[in-house]
Structure formats: C-alpha cells, structure tokens
Image (cartoon, rainbow, N blue to C red):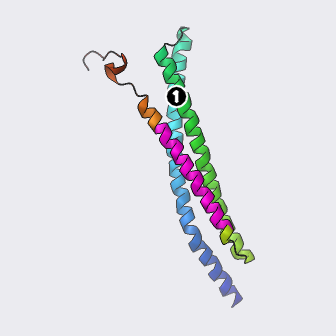
C-alpha cells in the first residue's frame, strides 16, 4: 500500500513538472534564436574590422557608427542570453524542488512559487533586452541611396 502511495506521489510530481519542461523547450528555442543573431552580429563586425585592417585605412564615420551599433547590439544580446539562461536554470530549480519536496514530503509551494516568479522576471527582462536589440538593429539599417550608398548598376 505504501509503495502505491509513493508511485502516486511521483506521478503527481511528474504531472506538475510537465509544464516547466515545456517552458524549458521554449526558452531553448529563444536561446537558439538569440545565439544565431549574436553570431551574425559578430560575423558582420569581423568583416568590417578585417576590411580596414587589411587595407591599413581608417574606417569612415559611417563604418565606425555601424561598428559601434554592432558592439551595442552584441552586448544587448549577450545580456539577453544571460537572463534567458538564468531563467532556464531557475526552471530546472523548480523541477528539482518539486521532486525533492515529493521525496522528503515537505511543502515546497513557497519555494516553487518564488523560483517560478524569479524565472518569469528574468525571462521578461531577457525578452525586453532582446526587443531593444531588434529595435536597435532596425534603426541602424542602411538601405540604398538613403544613406549615401550608390545602387549597383543594373539593379
């Protein structure tokens, strides 16, 4: 009879842990998007820097502005990735506390609630930083002749 109660308790904890596990997969997808964007920013910055290092020339104001914007974007994405990683770790903590509470038979509702609230605050902050990076990226896009570029012949 006691074994049945233990199995029932574990099954109940697994049911409770399913939602945080799905949340972890969503956070993982966001981290993938963010790291991809960070990689593109770093690649673009390296191309710009290499272009001027090879020719020994000083970059013009427009290129310096772009490098500055890329640096700022990289910092924003880095902080966003950090906050989303903290979120994932806190959600892992929620799952661990749920199981520990079931095995030790202690009320962990306060700890679970605090961990989850902290995770959601970190996730919201990470998403806000990510949104700021996107807004910065779209505000610094230079297309066509709008910023003094000449269109390609035949384009």
- Seen in the picture, residue 129 relative to 140 is either above or below; the reply is below
In this rendering, would 73 be left or right of 116?
left
Give coordinates of residue 23: x percent, y percent.
Answer: 53, 60
Image quadrant where one finds the N terminus: bottom right
**Does the segment drawn in magenta span residue 116?**
yes
- Could you classify mark 1 by the number of other residues whose Cα lies within 10 Å: few (under 14), some (14-19), or many (20 or more)? many
Residue drawn 56% across the image and 63% down it: 21
Residue drawn 57% across the image and 63% down it: 20
State the predominant SS element of the stretch in magenta.
helix
SS category of the residue bearing label 1: helix
**Does the segment drawn in magenta span residue 135?**
no
Q: In the displayed image of the protein, which residue is found farthest to the right?
A: 104
Residue drawn 69% across the image and 86% down it: 3
- Between 43 and 131, the residue placed more toward the observer is 131
Residue drawn 68% across the image and 65% down it: 96
Dot 1 corresponds to which residue?
70
Give coordinates of residue 126: x percent, y percent.
Answer: 56, 47
- Between 32 and 127, the residue placed more toward the observer is 127
Give coordinates of residue 31: x percent, y percent.
Answer: 54, 47
- Seen in the picture, residue 70 relative to 118 is either above or below; the reply is above
Place residue 111 in its image quadrant. Answer: bottom right
Q: Which residues are magenta?
A: 111-134
Give coordinates of residue 98: x percent, y percent.
Answer: 66, 70
């Amino acid at each position: 009879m006691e074994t049945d109660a233990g199995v029932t308790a574990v099954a109940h904890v697994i049911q409770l842990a399913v939602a945080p596990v799905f949340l972890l997969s969503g956070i993982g997808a966001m981290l993938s998007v963010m790291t991809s964007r960070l990689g593109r920013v770093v690649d673009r910055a390296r191309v710009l820097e290499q272009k001027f290092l090879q020719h020994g020339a000083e970059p013009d104001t427009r290129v310096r502005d772009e490098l500055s914007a890329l640096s700022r974007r990289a910092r924003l994405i880095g902080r966003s990735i950090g906050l989303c990683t903290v979120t994932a770790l806190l959600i892992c903590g929620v799952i661990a506390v749920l199981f520990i509470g079931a095995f030790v038979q202690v009320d962990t509702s306060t700890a679970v609630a605090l961990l989850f609230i902290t995770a959601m605050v970190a996730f919201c902050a990470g998403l806000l930083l990510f949104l700021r990076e996107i807004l910065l990226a779209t505000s610094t896009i230079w297309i066509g002749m709008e910023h003094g570029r000449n269109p390609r012949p035949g384009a």
